[in-house]
Image (tube, grey):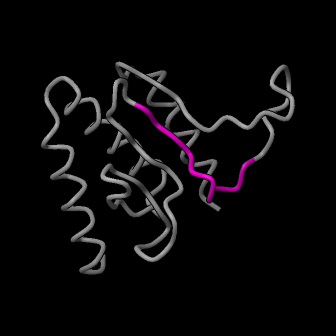
Amino acid sequence: MSSKDEKNLAQVLDKIAQLDEPRRSIVQRVHEVITTAAPALKPRIWYGMPAYALSAGTPALVTLRSDERLNLAITEKADFRPAGGVDGNLMPAAWYFETVDETTEQRIADIVRAVVP
């Protein structure tokens, strides 16, 4: 891990540590799911919140926000594909959540893996 990657990771972990419980624990767990599911993605701060990119110099592909609700989003820089089925040409790009269970963790891992080229 480069010194830039280490600095970025420290900033992300610091940002997570600043959250109040129970959000801190939830966001920490989602961070762990993202970094385990897609180890090629590097954590960094993007618009003040944790984000994940292929390197320190490339655009964020996934963001993790703590606003009114917790939110996992894919940025416009990811390679989108139409959802198909009843969603036709719509391209899913954001998911709100309030808790994280095993099913949610698996879905987050699947989403994150889908954006890594």
Indicate left or right for 87 with 13 as reference: right
* Residue at 77% from the left image edge and 45% from the top image edge: 81
Q: Which residue is drawn at 33% across and 50% down?
A: 50
- How many numbered marks, from 0 up? 0
Tell me which secondary structure the magenta stretch mostly adopts: loop
Q: Is residue 42 above or below residue 112?
A: below
Q: Residue 56 at x, y = what percent?
A: 40, 73
Return the residue nearer the eye: 107 or 7: 7
Query: Which sits in the foreground, 36 or 115?
Result: 115
- Taking the image as shown, residue 66 lies to the left or right of residue 57, namely left
Expressed as whole percent of the image width and height from the top left, the position of residue 14 reads: 15, 52
Nearer to me, 49 or 33: 49
In the image, is residue 87 part of the stretch drawn in magenta? Answer: no
Where does the image place residue 115, in percent across and percent down from the top left? 61, 52
Q: Give the quarter of the figure containing the C terminus.
A: bottom right
Q: Is residue 14 left or right of residue 106?
A: left
Q: Please give the name of the residue rendered at 37% of the width and 29% of the height, measured from the top-left corner.
A: 70
What residue sits 85% from the left and 24% below the top? 85
x then y, percent, for residue 84:
85, 31
Residue 47 is drawn in which quadrant? Answer: bottom left
Q: Nearer the viewer, residue 50 or 101?
A: 50
Image-quadrant location for residue 66: top left
Q: What stretch is highlighted in magenta?
A: 71-80
- Image quadrant occupied by the N terminus: bottom left
Residue 74 in the magenta stretch? The answer is: yes
